């Protein structure tokens, strides 16, 4: 089975249409208003994606109101959450029909005790100023340990590019990979040649 590939931080309908034609497994839309790659759920909901390409809404410390609004307007298949509070609970009734992914650094997941109710995990690098899209590589060694230790599927993110993704997949052996800034021509604009190269490299291992 080839590596699952998610192209994240899509900010325009034109980029979405062209990226979808390259057959990634999932596309991601940032739902955190403080992000430079933010796109509203209502706008995302007006954009079409082909059957078979999963739509991922990416949230930072979301409350139920935000998630309910997004579920109504964004037409997401998957909710990806970053930086949730310790007492944040996964309400399966609330998320009926949606997958829920938990994003964290490898160190956070390694020391976690109660996150295993999530469907999948995404390992990313840490930056005190922002969430995701930092271009910083996360700890591949610890990520590899977690892939072996945890039964749930794990996606690797953080500083991946067309040039290093094959090496990352070979070293860590994740279920999937996630890229945003590593395939940009400039902020909020994807480079289609880089996206194509990334997908091909990730699936070549």
Image (spheres, helix red, strand yellow):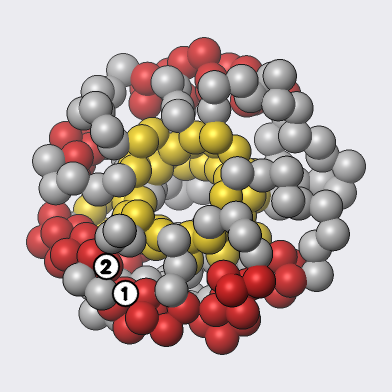
The total of numbered circles placed on residues is 2
Q: Quadrant of residue 173?
A: bottom left
Residue that carries the numbered disc 1 in the rendered image: 165
Question: Residue sitting at 55 percent across and 35 percent down?
Answer: 99
Q: For the N terminus, which image quadrant? A: bottom left
Q: Is residue 17 left or right of residue 108?
A: left
Q: Is residue 87 left or right of residue 23?
A: right
Question: Residue sitting at 57 percent across and 50 percent down?
Answer: 120
Question: Residue sitting at 22 percent across and 60 percent down?
Answer: 199
Q: Is residue 17 visible?
A: yes
Residue lying farthest to the top in this orientation = 72
Q: Quadrant of residue 33?
A: top right
Residue that carries the numbered disc 2 in the rendered image: 202
Asked whether the beta carbons under mark 2 and mark 1 sit within 8 Å of each other, the answer is yes
* Disc 2 to disc 1, C-alpha distance: 6 Å
Q: Position of residue 9 (x, y in %)?
A: 38, 48
**Residue 157 sits above or below residue 65 on the image:** below
Q: Is residue 130 visible?
A: no
* Within-10-Å neighbours for mark 2: few <14, some 14–19, many 20+: many
**Residue 2 sits above or below residue 19 on the image:** below
Nearer the observer, 67 or 167: 167
Question: Residue sitting at 24 percent across and 27 percent down?
Answer: 51
Nearer the observer, 188 or 103: 103
């Amino acid at each position: 089975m080839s590596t699952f590939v998610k192209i994240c931080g899509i900010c325009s309908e034109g980029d979405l249409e062209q990226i979808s034609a390259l057959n990634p497994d999932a596309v991601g839309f940032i739902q955190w208003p403080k992000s430079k790659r933010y796109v509203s759920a209502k706008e995302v909901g007006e954009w079409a994606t082909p059957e078979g390409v999963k739509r991922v809404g990416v949230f930072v410390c979301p409350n139920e109101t935000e998630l309910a609004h997004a579920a109504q307007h964004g037409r997401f298949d998957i909710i990806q959450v970053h930086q949730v509070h310790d007492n944040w609970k996964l309400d399966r009734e609330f998320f009926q029909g949606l997958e829920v992914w938990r994003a964290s650094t490898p160190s956070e997941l390694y020391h976690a005790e109660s996150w295993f109710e999530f469907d999948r995990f995404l390992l990313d690098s840490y930056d005190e100023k922002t969430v995701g899209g930092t271009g910083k590589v996360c700890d591949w060694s610890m990520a590899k340990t977690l892939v072996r230790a945890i039964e749930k599927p794990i996606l690797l993110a953080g500083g991946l590019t067309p040039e290093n993704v094959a090496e990352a997949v070979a070293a860590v052996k994740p279920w999937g990979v996630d890229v945003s800034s590593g395939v940009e021509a400039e902020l909020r604009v994807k480079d289609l040649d880089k996206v194509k190269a990334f997908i091909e490299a990730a699936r070549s291992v």
